[in-house]
Image (spheres, rainbow, N blue to C red):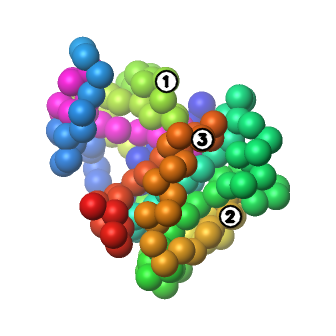
Amino acid sequence: MRLFHFSEDPGIARFVPRPVRMPADRAPGMDWLNGPLVWAIEEEWQAMYLFPRDCPRILLRAKADTTDADRARYLPDGARWAVHVEAAWLERLAAAAIHRYELPPPLFESLDDAGMWVARETVEPLALETVTDLPAALAAQGAAVIAMDSLAPLREVWSTSLHASGIRLRNAQGWA
């Protein structure tokens, strides 16, 4: 298994645990996830972070129990991911570069949620790769990019049988 951290900063020598910028409501006993941690994502789930940091996006992916109706409605034929992005972000997505740091798995513990892992100690990266063609990198992950004027019509996807991830939605037009 490979773990990654994505950043717009190409010069990170060490990842020091830090609290999340926007604390989330957590299940009882899980408040520690808002505390100082280093976050990583499994290779299989990296499509969620092949974006400029502040780009609002909704990513959809089938789960084992996803219904045929949800697949047909939300996932383009042959796509592993449906990636919804505001049209206003497409130019920035095409022009951006992101830095993918590979991290040592033994230092991390799984959250058993969408490929997310955390470390409670400082982590030194194993390798660094700069990804300069984000649309091509998304396509290589089986992601179909779908441009929308607003992501707001997708509020309903969290009640479907799909895995839905919403990232940086505070930056989305009309989301609040």
Q: Which residue is mark 1?
A: 112
Q: Which residue is mark 2?
A: 144
Label 3 CA crowd tier, 10 Å (few <14, some 14–19, many 20+): some
Checking the image for residue 160, the label placed there is 3
Q: Nearer the viewer, mark 1 or mark 3?
A: 3
Start-end of magenta stretch: 30-45
Q: Nearer the viewer, mark 2 or mark 3?
A: 3
Q: Are marks 2 and 1 in contact (CB under 8 Å)?
A: no
The three-letter code of the residue at mark 1 reads Asp
Instruction: Say above or below: 174 vs 30.
Output: below
Is 16 or 115 nearer to us in this picture?
115
C-alpha gap between disc 1 and disc 3: 20 Å
Q: Is 53 displayed left or right of 157 in the figure?
A: left
Is 146 or 121 nearer to us in this picture?
146
Tell me residue 42's x, y (percent). 53, 38
Tell me residue 121's x, y (percent). 24, 27
